Amino acid sequence: MVAAGSSKTISVTLRVWRQAGPNQAGRFVDYPAQDVSPNMSFLELLDVVNDRLTVTGDEPISFAHDCREGICGTCSLVIDGKPHGPHQGVASCQTYLRSFADGAVITVEPFRAHPFPVVRDLVTDRSAFDKIQQSGGYITARAGSAPDANSVPVPKVDADLAMDAAQCIGCGACVAACKNASAMLFVAAKVSHLGLMPQGQPERDRRVLAMVNTADDLGFGSCTNQYECSAACPKLISHDFIARLNRDFIAATFRSGFAATPANTGGGAG
């Protein structure tokens, strides 16, 4: 390890998954990165390696990124077997080289899950999360302006829980960490943060049923309560939300069996 602020440089080797396309075979390729700053972020290191590959006429490594501030979750990588890297509560872009020893061989690969197919190299298609969100992760009640919204009393414990759940950035680390590729922590966070608010009550049952069923249809696995999901989550979202999701799902399933059906208005037997 190198202390923060040290001017010493280090050298590492990146063992990177290279895959030309979703239907192409992939393999690991080693790339030396010599004399780099330990205070460089992991994405900056990939930039340096890509600059060198471009100069030599080689194909640069494809990886996804956007904010580079741990907000969007776009940078999702599996680093040395752990989604987002060795630390808890940070995204890949917040992982720094000082976390690794001089001379280390660092393995970098994409998130591995059937619903997250590889597009190229380290880039995966995580639009399955968008489909789950679109199936029910919204409210149709008008929330109004801030003063109107604040006129509805919300217990502080519910408001705090809703804010905790709403921190989910949809990166997919929970899926990558789960041996079953379960999306339960993601679904639980999205269902809970709306279900805890008054504006989310009218569609509460429909929401949880739609989002859970959509996740199943997309090929995500079942939760077996190993809690790797919450350990890998860059926002440290608790697996307790999965228990809340299960309660909501069971209750919604029970109530749906007693849902009112339209009266038969046809001409019955005389």
Image: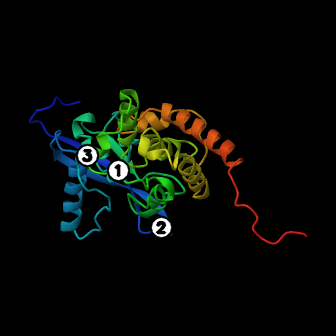
Identify the element where label 2 is drawn.
loop
| Amino acid type at image mark 2 | Pro
3D distance between C-alphas at marks 2 and 3: 45 Å
> In the image, is 85 to the left or to the right of 145?
right
Residue 70 visible to the viewer: no
Seen at 43% across and 56% down, the residue is: 140
Q: Is residue 230 above or below residue 127?
A: above
Question: Which residue shows up at 29% across the image and 68% down it?
Answer: 59
Contact? badges 1 and 3 (CB < 8 Å)? no
What residue is shown with label 3? 146
Specify the quadrant that holds the N terminus.
Answer: top left
Which residue is denoted by mark 2 in the rendering? 22
The residue lying toward the viewer, choosing from 56 and 146, is 146
Task: Give the alpha-carbon distance from disc 2 to disc 1, as whole Å.
Answer: 42 Å
* Among the two numbered marks 2 and 3 on one chain, the one whose residue lies closer to the N terminus: 2
**Which residue position is annotated with label 1?**
143
